[in-house]
Image (tube, grey):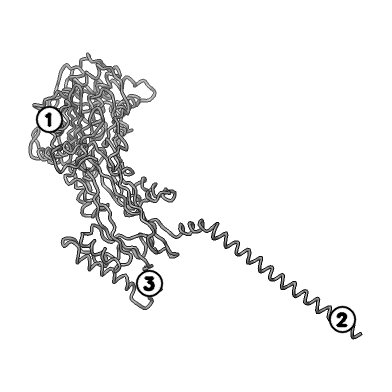
Amino acid sequence: MRKMDNEQGKDNETSDRKRFSFRINLFFFSSFIIFTVIIVRLAILQFVDGPQLKQQEASNVTKNVPLTPIRGTIYDSTGQNRLAYSTPVQSLYITLSKNYSDSMEKLRNPDKKLLPELEKMTQKLANRFAQYGNKDEPKMTAEQIMDAMDRNYQRFSGFTPRLIKTNLNKDEVAYFMQHKSEFPGVDVVEETVRHYDPDTVAVQAVGYIKSYKSARETLDKYKNIQKSMSAENDPGLIYMDNESVGFDGLEYQYQEQLRGKNGYKTVPIDPRNMPEGVDSVTPPQKGNNIYSTINKEIQVKTEEAITDQLRWLHSHAVSGKTHPYAKTGFAVAMEVDTGNVVAMASMPDYDANYWQTGTISKDKYEEIKHVYQNATIKNVGSGQSGQHPDSTVLLGSTIKPLSVLIGLEEGLFTTNTYYQDTGAAYFGRNNSSRVRNSSGHVYGSMDPATAIRHSSNAFMVDMVGKRLYNKYINNAAEDQGVNVWDRYMKEFGLGVSTGVDLPGEFKGLLEYTKKDESALSKLAYASFGQQGKYTPMQLAQYATMIATKGKRMEPHLVSQIKDTNGNVVQTIKPKVLNEVKFPDAYWNEVIHGMSTDVSAFKGFPYDFARKTGTSQQSVGRELKDNGVFIAFAPRQNPKLAVAVVIPEGGFGAWSAGPVARKIFDAYDEVYGLDGVPKKKDETATDPNAIKQP
């Protein structure tokens, strides 16, 4: 029995050893499998997935910080004069390497004075600016520097460099470059500042700049750019808040061409969104250069002509009185065949360099707020609402060539029809309304051309306004005659956009669309220029259309766009927007009638077509006489059309006519109304002339 028990014990012991051995083997085998899987996975991560993960990691912890783009230049038509250009300046930026916000400082130093490290730096910067800065410039205080740092991240994110000071002089640049280690995060960066011609050449047409942050709050164009930024793959096209962008004029219209591309630096970012260093820098690309059709010489003489004429009107009596309230004047000179606008003057003007940093002081804005907008294409108030006319005035007698064309085309009369002018025309129930000629003149028998030359209001009312109304009176719509009038106005560019390459164009005020006036009354007053207010640009296009006998040319202020190497990017070619085809006899009759006597053109060496106008409008319960004038020269093979408006200037022949004469003379000197310039080209010998690239 004892032997059997011993044998059974040995069997159990053997069985236990086998089970233990199995477990040990299973453990080691399992461990081997686990370690094998780990090793294989590590190998896959290192050799297969490693490069991709590394790239992904880099993209997650780097940010592209834009550097200011270099804006292109706007030249005048000669390519010699810069109307707007940028120059390099050195600016000092700081990138905060720590979170210095109030909340963080309270945690970091609960019982100590806040920001000891940053305060020391701001004071040190202020001391160095005072030591090395220009003696005649205001000194930056430590408080101003602290505000520029935006330590509470109200304006900038953590990794964005903060502009502390721009336009550093060479001593400041040298100091901060040599002592960079003493100012952590400080960099000297080359940027640009925008300049405008100091002779204030066509400043409202050229426009001005503002910061992108300010512009996107106002203009849809920049709001849309902001919305599309997240989808933009090219960091060179990302706009910065402090970047200057075009806000009006050519600066705005050609923003994309002028801007170029901003540079950027790729900054590694830690988990706190704070910078750890600079990985790489991509330099900015300069924008394209714009070549305007504005000729500086003609433009300056146009501006001087308006200023001189306003001064003359204040001191010289015309028809027994002076015109002390004639304080503004506007003119557009447009080439007939090309649509090139060679002069566009809105006076008084101002120094656009007020905007060169993209901001303007309150005092400066108050100084220019009534003159900085382009009143040749916009309706600009005088600043004394209800007392003086806005810049867009009634056409007055300058509408009469078109009135006669409408009458001829509508079959209301012929070129051989004669009308007996008695000095007045009557219309309405029982002829209760009367329109008189200027000064009550009685002109007697006249054909259509003579009616234009004498500027007969009576002819226009009786032969155009009343007859057009009667022709369509039997139509279902009482205003059908008004609709016909409106169609002709718009075909001639009055009441629609001219297509000029400038933003914010005013289409005109069509008073004949008012509901509180009869169709007959609307047409009677519209026929001699008292029912529509249009801009000088629209007037110039209208005059051009008469000169071309029906071609409405698109006006433009830019002829070419070139890159920085002088390669042509785009050429703006003449464009006909629409064409009105009337019999040649109608055009000849009207152009023959545009022969009003204008004393300012005495001795003018060319036969030219012209029409004066004196538009009367009620402002503040007083009648104001606005001077209006259109002309083109020469009468045969016309080259240039001009429109001039002098609000409250009185008769157009006396107020606006002299300005037009000086514009024609200036163009004749530079280009020649007959194709031969009358002035020798002096730019070839001018050592200071800027050569066209």
Number of numbered discs visible in the structure rendering: 3
**Residue at which label 2 appears:** 7
Location of residue 31 with respect to 373 vertically, above or below: below
* Circle 3: element type: helix
**Residue at which label 1 appears:** 678
Of labels 3 and 2, earlier in sequence is 2
Most extreme residue toward the top is 416
Q: Is residue 23 visible?
A: yes
Q: What is the C-alpha distance between the residues marked 3 and 2?
A: 82 Å
Q: Are marks 3 and 2 in contact (CB under 8 Å)?
A: no
Q: Are marks 2 and 1 in contact (CB under 8 Å)?
A: no
Location of residue 379 with respect to 91 vertically, above or below: above
Coordinates of residue 154 in the picture (x, y in percent): 36, 61
Within 10 Å of the Cα at label 1, are there few (<14), some (14-19), or many (20+) other Cα atoms? some
In the image, what residue type sits under mark 2? Glu
Most extreme residue toward the bottom is 2
Coordinates of residue 675 in the picture (x, y in percent): 17, 26
Report the quarter where the C terminus lies. Answer: top left
* Circle 2: element type: helix
Coordinates of residue 282 in the picture (x, y in percent): 35, 53
Of labels 2 and 1, earlier in sequence is 2
Which callout, 2 or 1, points to the residue nearer the camera?
Answer: 2
Q: Which mark is residue 105?
A: 3
